[in-house]
Amino acid sequence: MPTFKLDGKPIPFEPGDTIIKAAWRQGIEIPHYCWHPGLSSPANCRMCLVEIAPKPGTRPPMLDILELDAKTGEYRPVQKPKLQPSCYTPAAEGMEILSDSSAHVVRARRDVQEFLLLNHPVDCPICDQSGECKLQDYWLEHGKYQKRMRDEPVHKPKGVVFGPTIVYDAERCVMCTRCVRFMAEVAKDPVLDMRERGNLNEIVVSPGRELDGHYTFMTEHVCPVGALTTQDFRFKARVWFLRTAAAVCQGCATGCNAHLDYDPRYNKAYRYRPRDNERVNKFWMCDEGMLTYKRAHEGRELEAKVRGVKSSTAKALEEVKSLFTGVPKEGIGIVLSAEHSLEDNWALLELARVLIETSNVYLTGQPEGYEDTILIHRDKNSNTKGIAQLAPGAKPMQALLDDATAGRVTHVLALGGAVPLEADATSGLPGLASAKVVTIASHAGPLTAVAAVVLPATSWAEQSATYVNAKGMRQVSEKALEPQGASKPGWRQVSDVASALGYEAQWTKLRQIRAQLIGGAAIEASATPATLPAE
């Protein structure tokens, strides 16, 4: 692979890479505002300038400038190297590039910072970007100077509502145009543009339109400063109080990699952010997916229930034992859930096939919905492919209703609360009216509504769990929150159910289940370690 040198360090690059992208691949950040690895390069912020050393025997490009002589107080003509934007300059074999080691580059970055801050409001105490703002980071790294301009700064519109999700503060905008390019190049909806010139620039929405659709949150995510904020997160939390877990989006079968930001003091999730994975979701997430963090708290089943009445887990397990005592295995149906993790489903399937020895295995989950060609998959479950790998012969939910109606299945052990069918609000699932249903669920749904016993399961946010996306990639979502209410991991609830039914479950720890799963498809390397973690 060809290489160039950046401050003396060899940097390999692929054909077509720019200098900044090749450095980024190696974990080296050349300061920038407008560049983004998933977008085109306009080279308009000039923060990524570098010095390219001339080849032996060639004359470097130079610029004639006037420099103030501190001794005489007069300007004198001098020359300096012509710096190049690293986001636009292709990498070439044998290049010698100076970045942090060049005094000219360091000064240029300082000057760019000063120009950006001439009119920029220093309202960090009330800005949602405070704590993760590139202006702050680069000022500390390349500035630490006092503002020299004493004139009144240019004032621009503040709190401009771009649409149902995004608010714009033009005074904070550094005109990087990332939001404009994202909507045009990725979302394929060029609804944003830039108007005026110089320090009068601002971002505007096309006349007669508003910023809406399925990818508006991404405009806030790519913004390097606090110019764009989401209505959802605006003024909700300070980022320095938040902790982050590497999660997998539960919105659809794409399985976008995400950062789940939460406050451990309140055990509360506050937002999702995309986690880079060029094999799955690149650098993006859809709005619907980014809002699924709310399901860590909303619509939850947090207490055991017996016939709709809250109960202790011990009494609920006693009821399970009473319901299933003496029931022939032919009359027991097992329902796997495409919403629940691979570990939860493996445990229930193990109980069904090895301990109970029933072959009546069914599949449930959320119904299909909207899809596009960017990220959104029509399958609204995070683990359908995982169920197909575990139990390729699992029958659809309608088959369970038919078998229950015909009396072939009288007792049901299920995961999850959702069903991919229309459930009547008053009668629920008529096919299961005569069956005895026990479900282990993290969220309420038609199955929990008809269940004789409900055992609360932790959500994806409260346990380390594996999900298989539509491409067949196994990805681990890390634990963020502590279990809420009386919830336990689904696989642990299955183990307790097995004990209540008089069976001895061979799995009591997560590592034991994962040891059984390790022979399957490889774990997505950029999401998690190359092997399944023990816990």
Image (spheres, rainbow, N blue to C red):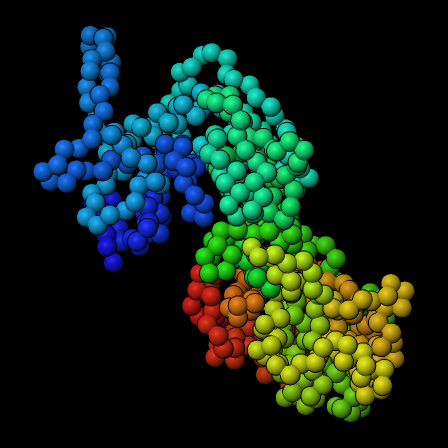
Estimate the x, y position of residue 66 in percent, counting from the top left: 24, 16
Residue shown at 87% from the left, 63% from the top: 425
Q: In the depicted view, which residue is nearer to us: 116 or 196?
A: 196
Estimate the x, y position of residue 429 in percent, counting from the top left: 84, 72
Estimate the x, y position of residue 156 in percent, counting from the top left: 57, 21
From this viewpoint, which residue is outermost toward the right? 426
Q: Residue 57 falls in which quadrant of the image?
A: top left
13 lies above or below 423: above
Residue shown at 42% from the left, 68% from the top: 530
Residue 219 in sight in this render: no
69 lies above or below 358: above
224 lies above or below 16: above
From this viewpoint, which residue is outermost toward the left? 57
Q: Answer with left or right where residue 130 lies relative to residue 364.
A: left
Q: Answer with left or right where residue 45 lies relative to residue 81.
A: right
Q: In the depicted view, which residue is nearer to us: 455 or 469?
A: 469
Estimate the x, y position of residue 334 in percent, counting from the top left: 71, 81
Q: In the depicted view, which residue is nearer to us: 214 or 403?
A: 214
Residue shown at 47% from the left, 11% from the top: 151
Q: Residue 509 falls in which quadrant of the image?
A: bottom right
Q: In the depicted view, which residue is nearer to us: 80 or 464?
A: 80
Q: Answer with left or right where residue 49 lies relative to residue 529.
A: left
Residue 506 in sight in this render: yes
Residue shown at 20% from the left, 7% from the top: 72
Q: Answer with left or right where residue 371 lies relative to residue 112.
A: right
